[in-house]
Image: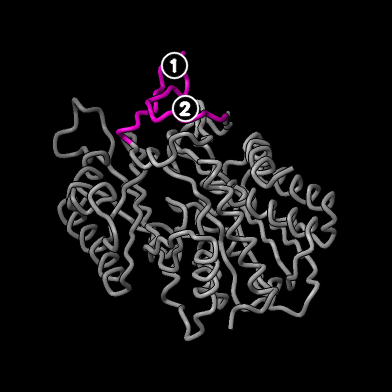
Amino acid sequence: MTNKDYLRDAFLRYTKISSQSVRHGEGLPTSEGQQQMVMHLKNELHDMGVTDADLHSNGILIAKIQGNTDAPAISFMSHVDTVDIGASPDVHAHIVEFTGDDFYLDKEQKIQFKVDDYPSIKAHKGDEIFVTDGSSVLGSDDKAGVAVMMGLARYLTTNNVKHGDVYLAFVPDEEIGLKGAKALDIRELPVKFSYTIDCSDGVGSFSYETFNAAEANITIKGVSIHPGRAYHILVNPVLVANDIIESFSDKDTPEYTKGYEGYYYFYSIEANPMEAKLNLNIRDFDLKKFEKRKEHVLDIIAKIQKKHPKAEITVDMYDVYANIANYLSQDKKPIELVEKSLANLGIEIQRAPLRGGTDGSVLSAKGLMTPNIFTGGYNVHSIFEYLPLAALEKSLDNTIEMVRILGEGELK
């Protein structure tokens, strides 16, 4: 079986396991499907001959492929959960042969993928493309990374390749605050640097800059009474919440920012006559601007509280992760290894800030430098997510080449 055939089968196999994380779920992992996923992976690794695989009760799976030379050890990480965007947690993935024209994800439901809405797909005319039926995300974030890491394990256990120890870490609940990575003890990864294999648009994408991220959970308690008797008594928490949202610039949002620009993102609101809850993401690459953004949120809350003195407004604000670049050291080998691998494969490097965060943000803060390398997936966190099989294959090629370079001692 070729690497391409393996990846095709493996990715479809993994998407059939429903492993969506639960935002306010208890424990780790927050869903049974994630536990099923890591158990499935452990069994597959065992069948490959990788018996040194430790599955923790918190859903973290760490496998070691014993080296056959004294080359430096390396580790790779992916997450097994998929994101909850309010769509179905069950993924029905399939492959389409992309002709370059618009196509239906589900013809009966008239869910159409319009090429002009997502022009990046035009570069993949003639390719096999993984898509959903439009009822869910595809989950290439990050089951594409899982498939690549399992493909690496298969390759190393069936080919005579020089390599040092290779560690594979699979973690849960990345999508809800990088919880799995936060629970991981980096002493279980005795390496000098590591990599996440996670979604970033485009073949050759390589990122060691992520957002600094915080979350603000805002609770507004109003005063409820029959609206016919509300004069000078009613405090409507819905309107107070609206005042808070309206206090932020409508251009300082994800849909109006790009590159190194930060943003505010109100991603959830719940309200009734007595209480309203807002959930706000705060993002910026620059640490000073990031701190100012958090101060700006508190200033707005204070202003709205003054406007509505009878309302009770509370804010729970906390940092979620930090920019990987905050922890860059003088040792550039983690970057040079990827650059050399992509150059050897003739893949143009796409160096850009990652407008999000990865488990590598947490590991880097713990002292283990962990940049992110591409899987080839596009439109993550969307029902129009897609993954070209050829791009996924190049992700595996790159991972294999990185291990080979270290094994052959080609990185000075």
Instruction: Give the residue at x 56% y 47%.
Output: 392
Q: Residue 231 lies in what quarter of the image?
A: top left
Please indicate whether residue 294 sits to the left or right of residue 54 in the image.
left
Q: Position of residue 338 (x, y in %)?
A: 52, 68
Where disc 1 sits, the SS reads loop
Left or right: residue 197 versus residue 240 is right
Q: Nearer the viewer, residue 305 or 407?
A: 407
Q: Is residue 27 visible?
A: no
In this view, the residue farthest toward the bottom is 330
User: Residue at the top extreme?
Assistant: 108
Identify the amino acid type marked 2: Gly
User: Is 236 in front, or is 207?
Assistant: 207
Dot 2 corresponds to which residue?
134
The stretch drawn in magenta includes residue 230? no
Instruction: Decide if residue 133 is in sight here.
Output: yes
- Quarter of the figure with the C terminus: bottom right
Name the mark on residue 78.
Answer: none
Magenta residues span 94-117
Question: x, y percentage for residue 133?
Answer: 51, 26
Q: Quadrant of the N terminus?
A: top right
Q: Quadrant of residue 344?
A: bottom right
State left or right for residue 373 relative to residue 252.
right
Marks 2,1: beta carbons within 8 A: yes
Total label count?
2
From the viewer's side, name the closer residue of 76 and 327.
76
Q: Position of residue 358 (x, y in %)?
A: 49, 60
As for residue 109 lying within the magenta part, the answer is: yes
Amino acid at the residue labelled 1: Gln
- What residue is drawn where x is 26% and y is 32%? 225
Mark 1 crowdedness (10 Å alpha carbons): few <14, some 14-19, many ≥20: few
User: Which residue is denoted by mark 1 in the rendering?
Assistant: 109
Q: Height in image: 67 above or below 31?
A: below
